[in-house]
Amino acid sequence: MSENADFVPLLLDWFAQNRRDLPWRRTYDPYGVWVSEVMAQQTQMDRVAVYFERFTARFPTVAALAEADETEVLKAWEGLGYYSRARNLLAAARRVMAEHGGRLPADFAALRALPGVGEYTAGAVAAIAFGRDEVAVDANVLRVLARVCDIDAPIKEPAGKAQATTLARELLPPGRARDYGEALMEFGALVCRPRTPDCPACPLAGHCAARRLNIVPDRPVLSKSKDITPLDVATGVLVHAGRIFIQKRLPKGAWANLWEFPGGRIEAGETPEQAVVREFAEETGFATRVETKLAVIRHGYTTYRVTLHCCLLRLTDLPEAAPPPEPTLTAAQESLWAAPDELSRYAFPAGHRKLIEQFGESLRRPGEARPLLDLSAGGDDPPRTPSTGKV
């Protein structure tokens, strides 16, 4: 047993008194634990709880999820970002139905073989749902162990993470994997926080090497941060005959199978208005003109910071009373002309969803001939939105 093991009983006592009432903890149903762990990746826990209850109400079992259409799953996931997680959940549910009789396997290796299930998720489900003596090492666990045990290697690099994982295994009290794993994660989230650790209230203070050495701000050791790349992109809301043009992205690549307003990067020497007219011509074959600028929405994902210029467009070669035309698609698999109140049925990337939320109420207001024009500028999304892409 590791020489650091003395803090584990204190940690377990703290968790018994301070554990949050999270919906999946009420039953520890393996399906619920699995969904919650996938949702919790790159997402704050308060958001996870809300989405979890909505998602599991719509798909209450592995079988219900496996039978769902991908479009339904993406819509239920909308707003959480990193949509590959939702696609992998669906693929894994179908694999569980086909190979495991509809029951999630308890074995780490069998869990690890499911689509989208890495070492962390396999360890978390095995330990928390099934009580197996496995460990789940996330950012919270890495931070707690780096401070308490003074891990001086960059914690997200292979050597540092391997050191922390070895420690986590050594410290695991046999038969207590669920409480131990959740306690480490909960403690990192509530007490041993990234920038504001609550050291005065910490029940582990007497065992914390970082506090004893007065190096809490230096633990964990972090890797050099990646440079942030700014992206200027333009997108257009094309309105004709009371309907709005949207298209469904290709099955592979950034934001696969999500719906969008066409657009793309602003090239050197272009204005946003010129860029969106060009992009529409390239992607749909439509000749358009900009009627007004709707909003500027800023949001971040991975190492990108996006400034999204949103314009209201009209067709230049058709009277408003004419039926909506058919596009020639070059960057999408499907398109439609949707009524404003139908947009909520479809899953959009975060920036486009934010645009819909901004003008949604105006679109639904009866008696206004041109409701799209009364819009305010957009704000900032937190840097958690998924993937890279043209918009």
Image: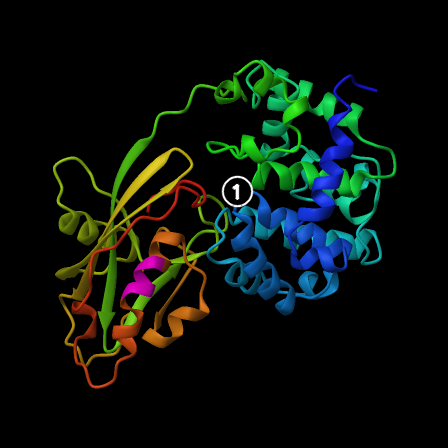
Q: Is residue 287 above or below residue 95?
A: below
Residue 103 in the image: state x and y as whole percent.
82, 56
Residue 320 in the image: state x and y as whole percent.
17, 77
Q: Taking the image as drawn, is residue 118 in sight?
A: no
Which color scheme did the rendering employ for the protein?
rainbow
Magenta region includes residue 307: no
Instruction: Report the front residue among 39 and 20.
Output: 20
Classified by dominant secondary structure, the portion drawn in magenta counts as helix
Residue 264 in the image: state x and y as whole percent.
28, 46
Question: Residue lying furthest bottom in this view?
Answer: 367
Q: Is residue 362 above or below residue 378?
A: below
- Secondary structure at badge 1 equals loop
Residue at the image position 77 percent from the left and 42 percent from the top: 179
Side (left or right) of 232 relative to 162: left
Magenta stretch, residue numbers? 354-358
Instruction: Report the front residue among 59 and 212.
Output: 212
> Image quadrant of residue 184?
top right
Residue at the image position 42 percent from the left and 36 percent from the top: 302
Residue type at mark 1 is Gln
Residue at the image position 63 percent from the left and 15 percent from the top: 159
Quadrant including the N terminus: top right
Residue 127 in the image: state x and y as whole percent.
78, 41
> Image quadrant of residue 186?
top right
Residue at the image position 71 percent from the left and 55 percent from the top: 25
Q: Taking the image as drawn, is residue 20 in sight?
A: yes
> Image quadrant of residue 382?
top left
For disc 1, the marked residue is 42
User: How many residues crowd mark 1 within 10 Å: few (<14), some (14–19), many (20+)?
Assistant: some
Side (left or right) of 345 relative to 25: left
